[in-house]
């Protein structure tokens, strides 16, 4: 009986792993799209446009599949406000601000720190040590991500970061901190809300916070119409970079826990570099293949 039950459970886990890998793929594309948008729009305007469109899509989706948004209790209201503030408002402000200051590939490197930061913060909050296999998997995946971003010259990357650690890098460190809060808070919110409902509430609240901040950003100016390329990039950021991956990511957090789900974000810089090679016709180097293999091995080790 237990062996018969193991097959559907295994297939469900396989589908979950595929979805989390696709989350990393879609988020890898956000660095290319975000770089395009940040060249035409201020960070606050870009983030507001992204989540305004994403909120509309999520509202339609939750209405079609769940009959609408559930009413929130006081505790749920506090949690969703914190989710919108951390994972939507603050993260995207720091994300677009960083992309305006530094190349997309360098920005992607910092995403590799997300799993370690989530694991450490989760361990500290729960006052527990992580299993040695999980720690090893996170470290292997991080090493692979660094190899991909550095092109195999890890020492040169470390030297470069030490010499040019500036405002953009600080913005991305702040983004990592925001994402840690979003992931850990999400585990609590998902105890009583579906992944789609939690994502929709977080997106709506984050959008409202961003929109309220627009008058505080300075004198209101008549915005110029974005170019066709920028418009496509915003649509991708809203749908491909928000609606689909946010819902799938929260399903992973709900089923696997924040530490195991977050380790899949080590695939983000790998996919980011790969998409850059495909879209921008950059050469595919041996370091990308070696680093990508290490990331996949680390993710597999963490989720054994």
Image: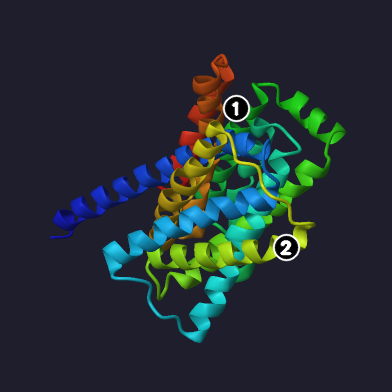
Give me the C-alpha separation between circle 2 and circle 1.
Answer: 40 Å
What is the total number of numbered labels drawn onto the structure image?
A: 2
Q: Give how far across and how far down residue 284 sits, in percent.
A: 54, 16
Q: Residue furthest bottom?
A: 74
Front position in the image: 59 or 4: 59
Q: Nearer the viewer, mark 2 or mark 1?
A: 2
> Which residue is located at x 40 percent, y 76 percent?
192
Q: Residue furthest right?
A: 163
Q: Is residue 140 visible?
A: no
Q: Residue furthest front?
A: 222
As drawn, the label of residue 215 is 2
Front position in the image: 165 or 209: 209
> Which residue is located at x 76 percent, y 63 percent?
216
Q: Does residue 103 lie above or below 174 as drawn?
A: above
Crowding around mark 2 (Cα neighbors within 10 Å: few <14, some 14 to 19, many 20+) is: few
Q: From the viewer's perspective, tell me whether residue 237 is left or right of residue 82.
A: left
As drawn, the label of residue 24 is none
Q: Are marks 2 and 1 in contact (CB under 8 Å)?
A: no
Sequence-earlier tag: 2 or 1 = 1
Q: Which residue is mark 1?
A: 148
Front position in the image: 283 or 99: 99
Q: Is residue 159 visible?
A: yes
Q: From the viewer's perspective, tell me whether residue 149 is left or right of residue 257.
A: right
Q: Give how far across and how far down residue 220 sits, in percent.
A: 74, 56
> Which residue is located at x 35 percent, y 42 percent?
18
Picture quadrant of residue 300: top left
| Label 1 element class | helix
Q: Give how far across and how far down residue 289 sits, in percent.
A: 51, 21
Image quarter in which the N terminus is found: bottom left
Q: Give how far across and how far down residue 127 sits, in percent.
A: 61, 69
| Label 2 element class | helix
């Amino acid at each position: 009986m237990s062996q018969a039950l193991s097959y559907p459970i295994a297939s469900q886990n396989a589908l979950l792993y595929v979805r989390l890998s696709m989350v990393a793929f879609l988020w890898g594309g956000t660095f290319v799209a975000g770089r395009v948008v940040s060249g035409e729009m201020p960070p606050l305007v870009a983030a507001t446009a992204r989540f305004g469109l994403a909120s509309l899509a999520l509202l339609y989706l939750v209405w079609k599949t769940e009959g609408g948004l559930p009413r929130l209790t006081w505790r749920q209201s506090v949690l969703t406000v914190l989710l919108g503030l951390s994972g939507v408002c603050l993260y995207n402000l720091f994300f677009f601000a960083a992309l305006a200051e530094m190349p997309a590939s360098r920005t992607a490197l910092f995403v590799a720190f997300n799993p370690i930061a989530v694991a450490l913060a989760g361990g500290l909050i729960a006052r527990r040590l992580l299993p040695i296999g999980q720690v090893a998997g996170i470290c292997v995946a991080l090493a692979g991500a660094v190899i991909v971003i550095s092109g195999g010259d890890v020492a040169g990357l470390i030297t470069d970061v030490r010499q040019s650690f500036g405002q953009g890098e600080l913005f991305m460190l702040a983004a990592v901190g925001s994402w840690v809060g979003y992931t850990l808070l999400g585990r609590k919110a998902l105890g009583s809300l579906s992944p789609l409902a939690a994502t929709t509430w977080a997106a709506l609240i984050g959008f409202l916070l961003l929109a309220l901040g627009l008058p505080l950003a300075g004198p209101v100016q008549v915005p110029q119409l974005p170019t066709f390329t920028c418009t496509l990039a915003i649509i991708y950021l809203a749908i491909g970079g928000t609606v689909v991956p946010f819902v799938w990511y929260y399903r992973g957090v709900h089923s696997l826990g924040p530490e195991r789900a977050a380790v899949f974000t080590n695939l983000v810089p790998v996919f980011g570099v790969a998409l850059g090679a495909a879209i921008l016709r950059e050469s595919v180097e041996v370091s990308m293949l070696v680093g990508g293999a290490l990331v996949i091995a680390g993710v597999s080790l963490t989720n054994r």
